Image: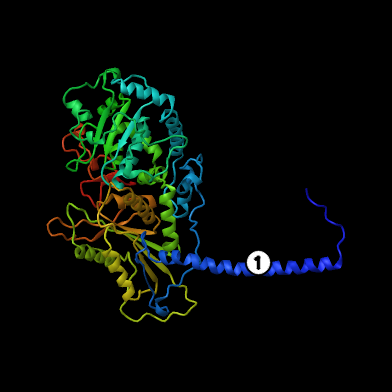
Amino acid sequence: MKMAKSPRRSQEEEDVAEEEKKNISHWRRLRRSELVLIGIFVSLPAIILLIGGRWGGNAAVAQSDPASPKGKVETKPSTTPAISSDKLLGGLLSPNFDEQSCQSRYKSHQYWQKSPFTLSPYLTKKLRKYESYHKKCGPGSKLYKKAMKQLKSGHNYENSQCQYVIWFPCNGLGNRMLSLASAFLYALLTNRVLLANMGKESENLFCEPFPGSLWVLPPDFPYNQHYNLHIEAPQSYVNMLKRGAFSYNANASSLPAYVYLHLEQFSLRMQNNIFCEEDQKMLSKFNWMLLKSDSYFAPALFLMPSYQEELKRMFPEKESVFHHLGRYLYHPTNEVWGRIERYYDAYLAHADEKIGLQVRIFREKPIKFEVMYDQIMRCTNQVKFLPEITHSEPPMRNSSTNTKHKAILITSLYAGYSERIRAIYYDNPTLNGEVVSVYQPSHEEEQQTEAQNHNQKALAEIYLLSFCDQMTITAWSTFGYVAHSFAGIKPWILMRPDWNTEVAEVPCIKSTTVEPCLHSPPLLECRGKDTDAAHLLPYVRHCEDVGFGIKLYDS
């Protein structure tokens, strides 16, 4: 019970009260100062850690500005980039998610450049319709339980309400992201529910892309042994066709419980009898389809007449396929997004221009460091993708000069390239007086596809690359394909050296499309022997970096 305040106080009491107010105010001012001082000391180790420029904190930053005293970098106040205010990417994303559970979904647009493509209203409608279908037929639903019961019976059924395509991974993260996006496009075209066998190494990488449902294959799926899925598997569609397990006019109820599509590149070609009209009609009778792939096979779907009208409505701009599907599907979990944001804010946020350089050395033909480094230098000397240096004294700069800060982000398994490029800008002034910083988040030395932490770092670096204003990538690299397609950038491509001389005659070529390359185009014997897929449609042509590969272009 509160005591009632006395309506009147003596003058003495009022004087005492006034003195207490002064003491309290003085104490608060002192406490603020102490708290600020304590905060500085507590924060100091974290500040020192951030200076390193790598995930682990080892020094990986060189900032060179010879025109300023002692090479000091002039920086602007830290601000979160605000390139676009449209967190739904023009309607590409569904608003039916909790923002805090997956922060990247509605925050990535703040870091990406504005998309160079117009989003098709038909694609938006198609995605919303698919989301409802996925929720109705996805794991946990009554229809999914019914479909599982039919699958376990060992027989296919006619007139099923739900059909499925189960994706299985193959090779590294870039390959997986490209092939899974292709499988999703196939699901959209064939009215199937996409479920993904992510594997332990891919756990905690991506948020769920479909509201109110799951896309991860439940662990109790009966045919979950990915090691049984290979080109010689007896359940393979091509192998069943060869041994006469069914005919093209077979009824759905007479077919096996599931069919397997092997879309891994084999001798740099995909199998025949997959991207042909008659075979696709046959495949549509199977309610359950297992699909294993390491390839971006989306361009092959454009070769099929039965899908072309639908694809035209979904993607009036052919180069936008992975750009839109990738931005729709892939949202890093909060753990991975935290790495991305912290690194960006610490090292890239102040830059006026961000330049990405991705260097990939392939195990089947490792190129010596000096040879690859020389190719990078020949490329930048020709096309100037890195800031130019000068060996003469730079002009004196007064304090009012608006100096530009350029950040070079290098992603590679090896530290040598960033160390050598950093030394260039440490030892030489730039021609135009820019401040140049060189960063590399990690150098794992070797690819570790089966390690979850390695994949988290790789995904973070793909996203950081995609936030750059311009980019140079390595030929054949799916990692680089994903990054530049996310960004909507046509990159410079470091060409693959000659197999014998180990030297690339042309160091780099400018890509003329945003789309990734399908390294292994399909055999199309149904169109005629030795059919070249790049000659069938004006917007499907050979890749710049893989001469026999195909990709999509805007005519």
Residue 320 locus on image (x, y percent): 37, 46
Quarter occupied by residue 395 = bottom left
Residue 466 x %, y %? 38, 54
Is 467 on the left or on the right of 257, as rendered? right
Q: Does 329 sit above or below residue 72?
A: above
Residue 7, x across and y down, in percent: 87, 57
Q: Which residue is mark 1?
A: 28
Q: How many marks?
A: 1
Residue 263: image location, x then y, percent:
24, 37
Residue shown at 24% from the left, 66% from the top: 378
Q: Foreground: 522 or 77?
A: 77
Relative side of 125 to 423, left or right: right
The reply to whether residue 161 is in sight is no
Q: Residue 269 lies in what quarter of the image?
A: top left
Q: Going 50% across and 56% down the picture, which residue do you hit? A: 82
Q: Is residue 435 above or below residue 519?
A: below
Q: Residue flagged by tag 1: what amino acid is it? A: Arg
